[in-house]
Amino acid sequence: MLALSRKKNEALVINNDIEITILEIKGDQVKIGINAPKEVPVYRKEVYVQIQKENEEAMNSDSLNALADFFNK
């Protein structure tokens, strides 16, 4: 992991097309702005983990087998 120090209104660039800017610092909270191309998904980690979990559950679900059986008839 790369750890960087930034002050308010300072930014960093990732892969030439994603810019992360520090917008505000209040106590232990930091507000950031992310400027990225529309085709680049940006999620809070807890949302991303939940999406991955739901996708995995859907792939392991019996409904997927039922759907496959339906098309194989």
Image: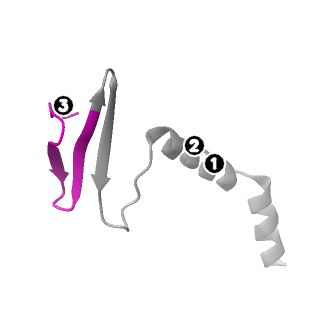
Q: Residue at x 65, y 55 (%)?
A: 59
Q: Which residues are magenta?
A: 1-24
In the rendered image, residue 72, in percent from the top left (x then y), is placed at 79, 77
Give left or right: position of 73 versus 25.
right
Tell me the element at label 1. helix
Tell me the element at label 3. loop
Tell me the element at label 2. helix
Give left or right: position of 36 versus 54.
left
Q: Please say which color scheme the image uses.
A: one colour
Q: CA distance from mark 1 to mark 3?
A: 31 Å
Q: Which residue is mark 3?
A: 3
In the rendered image, residue 30, in percent from the top left (x then y), is placed at 31, 32
How dense is the environment of label 3, judged by Cα within 10 Å: few (below 14), some, or many (20 and up)? few
Q: Looking at the rendered structure, which numbered label has been put on residue 54?
A: 1
In the rendered image, residue 1, in percent from the top left (x then y), is placed at 23, 33
Q: Quadrant of residue 2?
A: top left
Q: Which residue is mark 2?
A: 50
- Going from N to C along the chain, the mark reached first, 2 or 3, is 3
Q: Quadrant of residue 29?
A: top left
- Comparing 25 with 51, the one in front is 25
Please name the amino acid that badge 2 sits on.
Gln
- Going from N to C along the chain, the mark reached first, 1 or 3, is 3
Please name the amino acid that badge 3 sits on.
Ala
